[in-house]
Image (cartoon, rainbow, N blue to C red):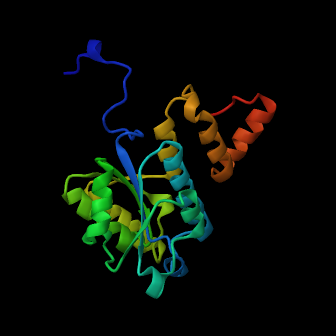
Amino acid sequence: MVDFAQVTATPGPDLLTPDNCAVLLVDHQPQMFFATGSGDRTAIINAAVGLAKAAQVFAVPTVLSTVAAESFSGPILPQLAAVDPDNPVVDRTTMNAWEDEAFVAAVRATGRSKLVIAGLWTEVCVVGPVLSALSQGYEVYVVADACGGVSPEAHEHALQRMVAAGAVPVTWVQVLLELQRDWARSATYTAVTELVKEHGGAYGVGIVYAQAVIGAHAAG
């Protein structure tokens, strides 16, 4: 039975915070996008870049990875590389990034227990590291709108498989706002609202309107 007298205004341990998570961006590359058919590819790019920028706003460590960049798939999207140009990209031969020692070492170096993952394709290069990380005790959050599969069915079935294994499906805006969580946090307030205006679609347009009509501090 819950002792409601002991309830406090503190975040639960399941919430993402800037101090407990890392972002993994896997295989957002031209060749992978060519065959992505689960949703609008421009929207997936927008979500992936928004997620990468959210990580930057909150100083969340980010691991970037590609597969066969020079021989087949092409480089990581320039929009992603530009977010943190000094962050090295781990290139692999393995479809499952978790079977690459350099990738796992980079993840381990973050020291974080919660992994926020997005990539292409959902049913191959996202499923692999998600299931592998879960098996090794990590908590994994899959950013569904920053992922894409070769078909709507492939994407959806992959999400179902990962959820059944214990992964948590989220969206990039959900991650952003969970990291912010309080509009009184002035250190990141402006950066968050600017990011939403740039990549948040209708939500961002709403903030532009609110700030124009209500005032510069309108948000939420």
Left or right of 99 in this view: 152: right
Residue at 80% x, 35% y is 212
Horizontal and vertical percent for residue 136?
Answer: 19, 57
Residue at 30% x, 73% y is 96
Residue at the far bottom: name it: 71
Residue at 54% x, 64% y is 81
Horizontal and vertical percent for residue 55?
Answer: 49, 49
Q: Which residue is more in the foreground, 139 or 4?
A: 139
Left or right of 132 in this view: 168: right
Q: Quadrant of residue 23?
A: bottom left
Q: Which residue is more in the foreground, 46 or 20?
A: 20
Residue 158 position (above or below residue 214): below
Quarter in which the N terminus is drawn = top left
Q: Is residue 198 visible?
A: yes
Q: Is residue 40 visible?
A: no
Quarter in which the C terminus is drawn = top right
Residue at 51% x, 36% y is 180
Please state the total of marks drawn on the protein image.
0
Q: Which residue is more in the foreground, 70 or 200?
A: 70
Horizontal and vertical percent for residue 66?
Answer: 43, 73
Residue at the far top: name it: 5
Residue 34 position (above or below residue 198): below
Residue 206 position (above or below residue 47): above
Left or right of 135 in this view: 54: right
